[in-house]
Amino acid sequence: MPHLTASDGCRVHYDLLGTGTVPVVLIPGLGGDGRFWGGVVERMGERFRLVVTDHRGAGRSDRPAGAYRIGRIAQDVVELLDHLGLARAHLVGHSTGGAVVQTLALDHAARADRIVISGSWAGPDARFRAMFGARLALLEAGCPQIYQSFTHVLGFDAEWIAAHEAELDAAVARAGEALAPLDVAAERIRMLLAFDRRAELARITAPTLVLAARDDMLIPCAQSRAIATLIPGAAMITLSGGHFYPRTRPDAFADAVAGFLARAARPAKDREGDRVAAAG
């Protein structure tokens, strides 16, 4: 399987997908597995060259012990771009991936073309600390199956859960293996609680689209609206489908992202003043 050996020796899995030529990096959320993007890849692959990466500590990448930071995952993406010979790319991140995209746009601005921040947050508020503190406590107590069930209830809308009950039950049964080692999974939640770039978002210069789901129970839409307010010129689109809407509503997600990224192919004079209208 293709992988990058990062500068600290961690092996980071990635896939190159799609038949298009415009490079787009897809960065998943806390689950950290690039296969999260399967439905989106099917719908965007003909137009874009998709670089789909797993996080260190998750998916098919190595899971080293020790501290985890959003900045280190962002550095992995930079090193992957170097590995692939890409000076710049469009960057699309969902949830934790959105925090990675914020970091890339701030700390590695020359590598970011257009950016999409989906279902994410810029810093923890009281609700965020309570939510992720509870999830952390489940991992620290050695309860991966309960953690996974909790994730499903928070992440998927009721209609999707009803239609995929057997699939979700199987994921709960596999949770102990998928989340192992639990101390790494717990450390990755601590990295979310430590992330806060709110005071810096005004420095982002990359054209930005913020996406959110109005029925997101894990990262409420208000968190995304705050990001859109703080980044100069950011556009925002509101969708539906629960927190995992790139998985439950891949058509709507792919249409929004592809439309926004397609504007990069137009002459600058034709793009001046472009805004993406909020849907719904």
Image (tube, rainbow, N blue to C red):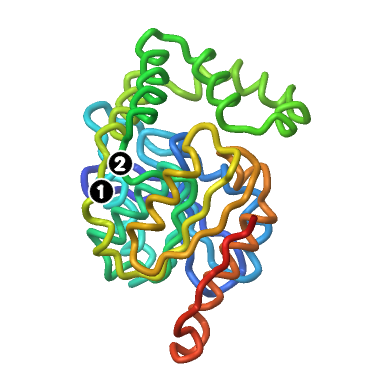
Q: Is residue 55 above or below residue 205?
A: above
- Which residue is situated farthest in the right direction here? 163
Q: Quadrant of residue 154?
A: top right
- Residue 55 is left or right of residue 15, and the answer is left
What's under tag 2, amino acid-wise?
Answer: Gly
* Residue positioned 64% across, 45% down in the render: 240
Horizontal and vertical percent for residue 135?
A: 42, 20
Asked whether disc 1 touches disc 2, contact meaning CB atoms under 8 Å apart, the reply is yes
Label 2: element kind: loop
- Residue 247 is left or right of residue 208, and the answer is right
Label 1: element kind: loop
Horizontal and vertical percent for residue 159?
A: 74, 32
Marks 1/2: CA–CA distance:
6 Å
Horizontal and vertical percent for residue 249?
A: 68, 47
Q: Quadrant of residue 258?
A: bottom right
Q: Which residue is mark 2?
A: 123
Q: Nearer the viewer, residue 221 or 244?
A: 221
* Residue positioned 73% across, 23% down in the render: 165
Q: Nearer the viewer, residue 261 or 34?
A: 261
* Residue positioned 65% across, 68% down in the render: 46
Q: Which residue is mark 1?
A: 197
Q: Quadrant of residue 40?
A: bottom right
Q: Nearer the viewer, residue 183 or 149?
A: 149
Q: Nearer the viewer, residue 138 or 83?
A: 138
- Residue 122 is left or right of residue 260, and the answer is left
- Residue 149 is left or right of residue 185, and the answer is right
Which label belongs to residue 95? none
For label 1, the crowd category at 10 Å Cα-Cα, with few meaning under 14, some 14 to 19 and many 20 or more, is some
Q: Is residue 43 above or below residue 248?
A: below
- Which residue is situated farthest in the top direction here? 141
For label 2, the crowd category at 10 Å Cα-Cα, with few meaning under 14, some 14 to 19 and many 20 or more, is some
What's under tag 1, amino acid-wise?
Answer: Arg
